[in-house]
Image: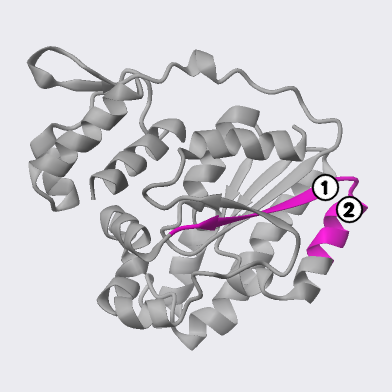
Amino acid sequence: MWRVIARHIRNDIEAGVLRHGQPLPSTRALAAEWDVSVDPVAKAMAELAAEGLVVTRDRSSRIVNYPDAELAPAALPTTPKVLLIGGYAGSGKTELGRILARRTHWPILDKDTTTRPVVEAALEKLGVPPSDRESDIYLTLIRPAEYEALIAAMTENVSCGNSAIVTAPFIRELSDRAWCDRISASVESMGATLHVVWVRCDADTMRAYIRHRGAARDSAKLANWEDYLAGIDLDFKPAIDHMVVENSAGARPLQQQAEELLRQVGR
């Protein structure tokens, strides 16, 4: 478990959720937050301190050590790039998107951030809980419009010559070769290049992430975790050329993998 905690905090630091100089909660507070004893938290903090991401001050308080000076913006690409990042709930796709956005200063379009208030209002109006993501009403009526709005926002950016980082599960979309061909042709028609990234994560790490973030939209998954796992394919591969980023607890830091990804797409 300490690896999951260390990875989550490391991802939040590299994604800018936790900023340079920001104090971290105490060991006991973090233990309560993660519902563990203090030992895994202490081990996670020792790991992050050894990496230089966390500094211990007097009275055992800790602060984030990640100067923004390290994040000089990359040069603007001559050809706009679309990084389409998919993955299951809790896989870390949004964290990866934020890390890439901080490195490149390209806009990040995250499905939940972009569409959640409208989706929740629509679901409530239709008489279902705002957190619902499993019913036929959501899957057949709301979800298609949600993804249409997300892709439209990406298209508007790219048509203006901007690169874009787009994060969403994209499971149904990336399993459909026809959809993949259409989005690839659309991006190419605007003089841009499409790069699909699949974020892979093991079941235990995903569950720990989902429990920790405490989002209402995940309640059905957590309440029926074994059924949820039975309905997904942890070995899923998009039906289009893609890159894989591994975000399980023991994998290399996302920051390192993000740098490799940017070298591959030619930022």
Q: Foreground residue, 33 or 37? A: 37
Q: Quadrant of the C terminus?
A: top right
x, y percent for residue 77: 80, 30
User: What residue is at 87 percent from the left and 61 percent from the top?
Assistant: 185
Residue pointed to by mark 2: 188
Q: Nearer the viewer, residue 55 or 152?
A: 55
As drawn, 50 above or below 223: above
Tell me the crowding category of disc 2: few under 14, some 14 to 19, or many 20 or more residues within 10 angstroms, Cα based.
some
By what rule are the colours in the image chosen?
one colour
Quarter location, residue 242: bottom right
| Secondary structure at numbered mark 2 | helix
- Looking at the image, residue 55 lies above or below residue 222: above
Per the rendered image, the range of residues in magenta is 182-201
Would residue 62 be found to the left or right of residue 205 on screen? left
Label 1 element class? strand
| Label 2–label 1 contact, CB within 8 A | yes
